[in-house]
Amino acid sequence: MIDLKELREDPDRFRRGVADKAMSVDIDRLLALDEARRSILTRQEVARAEQNRIGKELGPKLGALKGKVKHAHGDERASIEQEIAQLEERPAALKSEIQECEHRIGSIEPEWKSLWMQVPQPPADDVPKGKGSDDNVEIRRWAPAGWDFAKTFEGNRGFKPRTHTELLKMHKLADFERGVKMAGTRHYVLTGLGMRLHQAVLRYAVDFMADVRGFTPMGVPVIVKEECMVGTGFFPAGREQAYHIEESSRGSGHDLFLTGTGEVGLMGIHADEILSLDELPLKYCTVSTCFRREAGAAGKDTAGLYRIHQFDKVEQVVVCKADDAESRAWHAQMIETVETILQSFAIPYRLLQCCTGDLGVKNEDMIDIESWMPGRGEMDRDGSPMGAFGETHSASRLGDFQCRRLNLRYKDTHGKTHFAFALNNTVIASPRVLIPILEMHQQADGSIIVPEALRPYMGGIARIG
RNA sequence: GGACAGGUGGCCGAGCGGCUGAAGGCGUCGGUUUGCUAAACCGGUAUAGGAGUUAUUACUCUUAUCGCGGGUUCGAAUCCCGCCCUGUCCGCCA
């Protein structure tokens, strides 16, 4: 969430942020509610202060009188009782005023809080303006030697490509029918070498993060409390995307949610903590199963391994000082990590700078990395796919938005606390990444050459089929 | 799942209706002492919100916070209720 003080000081900055992100949050309403809330709060505090002061002065006296009244009789008793009643008059008046304030605050707060949570992190200044993904700006593209983006797959390789679904079937790498039988649409079973390849890319990515990048691998919960989802910024906006475990309806204390990314578990680790400077930056990665309802995506990418309800992902996060330059440096390293990995798989890809309209509530800057998938895209005259880029990675800078929501802070050298900056990035998401791997490395006979980098994780297997 | 016990500041631990934002200790930071280190001594040492002064830095006042939420009371860390969590024992089970 954003800083309300900053909102008060420069509301236009946030109005612009909302507009640039093509969202609608009533900033004026929020400001009005905030103003009202603070004025009532001030009134309540003044009353409380007096209550406390009176309490200290009269409290012990009252106690003594009340003790005395028990043993008093007749006139004496009556006069003591009167004295007590007098003394209690003012505190009673204060109490009712405090309660009234509390009720009024209670009536404002839900809407105030809800609006506050919806205000997005304004995009960084250098993020190009745009309405949606069509306005994203390609930064650069890369292809291995021997691959020319200007030519079709056939032009490059001399034969027509099979789609990954065909290849999966051909080599018995996945079983969609039985996946659907067990769990419904968008579910699958990875079988045999399909599962091994899946595991191989994950292990390769974790090892890269740990051994080359020096990140700490973590195993984190994938079923979490609502606070984690809110704290990481996925709720309330993304509520529809998460599977909901209604434990409360069975008498348990709280509901749980399945996480759609390891980012939730990684960022939740230090929620409500104040870290010391020497603990920063936090460099964590995890491999976790991710669950997504894909609500609103009905009919989209229904075939194959592209859009599924359950997958595994190696995710990295960095929590660093509240410093823009440092955050940008980590961002650059994340992108480099993804490029290194994709290059080691010899997969052509391109980098897109996401425009303002394509950013979510929590990020101020995001790069999407799209891999070339020969089996995607429009069909040519012969009914064979022309290939297309498909998103396989993204890397985001969140500023302090997420850490403010998580209440994750650090103490600087002067002992002052600050909300930390956070970044996150897909190191690898599988099985989606298997699509370009299978499709790019297929041979004319349908067999698939396993990228060299993965062979050590495949028991040395160099070829499928 | 059953039975007890318990959740207090960075940690340990007292408090069990007003004098307690909270004793004492440990840790930590600053200082004095010391040839250096150690010891000793002195002082500081939570977080958030609001208001104000100065307006980088800082300071003052004030409110809230003793697991979370609610209640009793003029007044709650302290009493009552609900929930969550932890420990121990028993049962069950990857």
Image (cartoon, coloured by chain):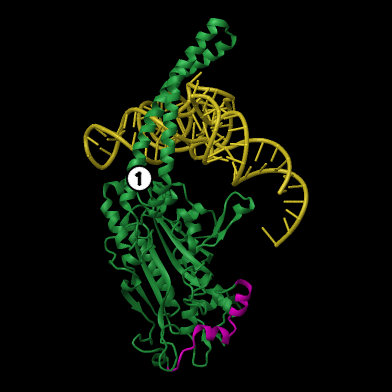
Chain B color in figure: yellow
- A330 is higher (above) or lower (below) than A437: above
How far across and how far down the image is residue A197, in percent? 55, 77
Which residue is painted at 40% across and 50% down in the image? A404
Q: Residue furthest top?
A: A75
Residue nearest the observer in this picture, B87 or A329 = B87
Which residue is painted at 50% across and 8% down in the image? A79
Residue nearest the observer in this picture, A59 or A290 = A59
How far across and how far down the image is residue A96, in percent? 44, 29
- A125 is higher (above) or lower (below) than B28: below
Instruction: Answer with the quarter of the image where residue A421 lies.
Output: bottom left
Magenta run includes residue A174: yes
Residue nearest the observer in this picture, A211 or B76 = B76
Q: Is residue A154 visible?
A: yes
Q: How many marks?
A: 1
Which residue is painted at 45% across and 15% down in the image? A86
How far across and how far down the image is residue B84, in percent? 59, 46
- A97 is higher (above) or lower (below) than A179: above
Give the residue pinned by disc 1.
A33
Quadrant of the rendering where the C terminus of chain A is positioned: bottom right
Residue nearest the observer in this picture, A302 or B89 = A302
The magenta stretch is: A158-183
Q: Secondary structure at mark 1?
A: helix
Chain A color in figure: green
Magenta run includes residue A311: no
Instruction: Answer with the quarter of the image where residue A95 lies.
Output: top left
Q: Tell me which amino acid carries mark 1.
A: Leu
Q: Residues within 10 Å of mark 1 (few under 14, many from 20)?
A: some
How far across and how far down the image is residue A336, in percent? 38, 69
Chain under callout 1: A
Q: Is residue A192 visible?
A: no
